[in-house]
């Protein structure tokens, strides 16, 4: 404990390993070694010790915290299938009335793991449970659930969650593109413009933001603005053929036929190059 309190982890590990040699059946030592390795961010080594601890534990109530620890290590190593497996074992080992903090943590990280595994319905379910368990580190459960809703094309629910996050953290740019695209997909173009412009001003997702912003302006018949942003998206090699084609359409609407012709000719060249 003296070593741990001074974060002298290497010394602590030496002592723990010496004790393990003397008491190889002492399950607490394996868990402690796992905790030290985890604190040192040696997550692979931590998992080895935690699994050794499981070999000496028979009661589910004794095993559950080790399951949670392995889940966290797997999550930190981006081994999301393993993370889901051990978070699920942890949840199965808990009762309905206990350890809501631990269950909230497990549901949150399992939910994020499901997002990484493109299992968005499961992610929504877990992140909803995390919120119900009041596990909301900096409201990130709402943000992550908003992402899952976005991937499920449930745009209004995505907007609701992401706006909760942005109201608390207005300078955090992470949700902006998802809010912009969600508003775009429900045809709330005025709100979409706000977030696409925020992305552009912050140099985020510039190609995508300019392209969709141009499309909004084309639909609004604001052709000069459409040309400005389609030109920007083409210059950034984002949907270049569509950007040039729509720039030509905007020029036609402004009766600038020569500029339109040039853009259409560029589209033909791109098409021929892609389909020789």
Image: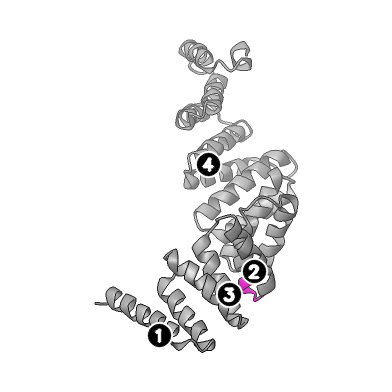
Secondary structure category for the residue under label 4: helix
Measuring from the top left, give residue 229's x and y in whole percent. 53, 70
Quadrant holding the C terminus:
bottom left
The circle drawn on residue 193 is 2
Kindly identify the residue that appears in the image at 57 percent across and 80 percent down. Answer: 223
| Above or below 87: residue 224 | below
Residue with the mark numbered 3? 225
Mark 2: give few (<14), some (14-19) or many (20+) Cα within 10 Å. many
The circle drawn on residue 49 is none
| Above or below 273: residue 258 | below
* Magenta stretch in the rendered image: 183-188
- Is 5 left or right of 212, judged from the image as shown? right
Residue with the mark numbered 1? 261
Kindly identify the residue that appears in the image at 59 percent across and 51 percent down. Answer: 111
- Are the residues at dot 4 and dot 1 in contact (C-beta closer than 8 Å)? no
Q: How far apart are labels 4 and 3 at the CA level? A: 45 Å
């Amino acid at each position: 404990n003296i070593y741990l309190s001074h974060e002298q982890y290497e010394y602590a590990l030496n002592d723990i390993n010496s004790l393990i040699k003397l008491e190889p059946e002492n399950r607490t030592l394996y868990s402690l070694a796992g905790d030290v390795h985890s604190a040192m961010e040696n997550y692979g080594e931590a998992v080895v010790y935690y699994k050794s601890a499981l070999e000496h534990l028979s009661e589910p109530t004794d095993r559950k915290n080790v399951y949670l620890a392995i889940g966290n290590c797997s999550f930190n190593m981006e081994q999301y299938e393993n993370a889901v497996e051990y978070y699920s074992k942890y949840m199965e080992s808990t009762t309905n009335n206990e350890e809501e903090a631990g269950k909230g943590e497990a549901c949150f990280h399992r939910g994020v793991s499901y997002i990484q595994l493109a299992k968005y319905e499961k992610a929504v379910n877990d992140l909803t449970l995390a919120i119900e368990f009041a596990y909301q580190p900096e409201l990130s459960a709402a943000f992550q659930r908003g992402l899952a809703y976005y991937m499920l094309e449930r745009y209004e629910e995505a907007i609701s969650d992401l706006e909760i996050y942005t109201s608390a953290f207005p300078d955090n740019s992470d949700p902006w593109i998802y809010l912009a695209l969600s508003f775009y997909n429900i045809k709330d173009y005025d709100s979409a413009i706000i977030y696409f412009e925020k992305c552009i001003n912050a140099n985020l997702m510039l190609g995508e933001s300019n392209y969709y912003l141009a499309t909004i302006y084309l639909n609004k018949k604001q052709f000069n603005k459409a040309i400005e942003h389609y030109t920007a998206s083409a210059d950034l090699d984002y949907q270049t053929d569509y950007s040039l084609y729509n720039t030509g359409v905007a020029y036609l609407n402004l009766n600038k036929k020569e500029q339109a012709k040039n853009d259409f000719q560029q589209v033909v060249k791109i098409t021929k190059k892609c389909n020789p």
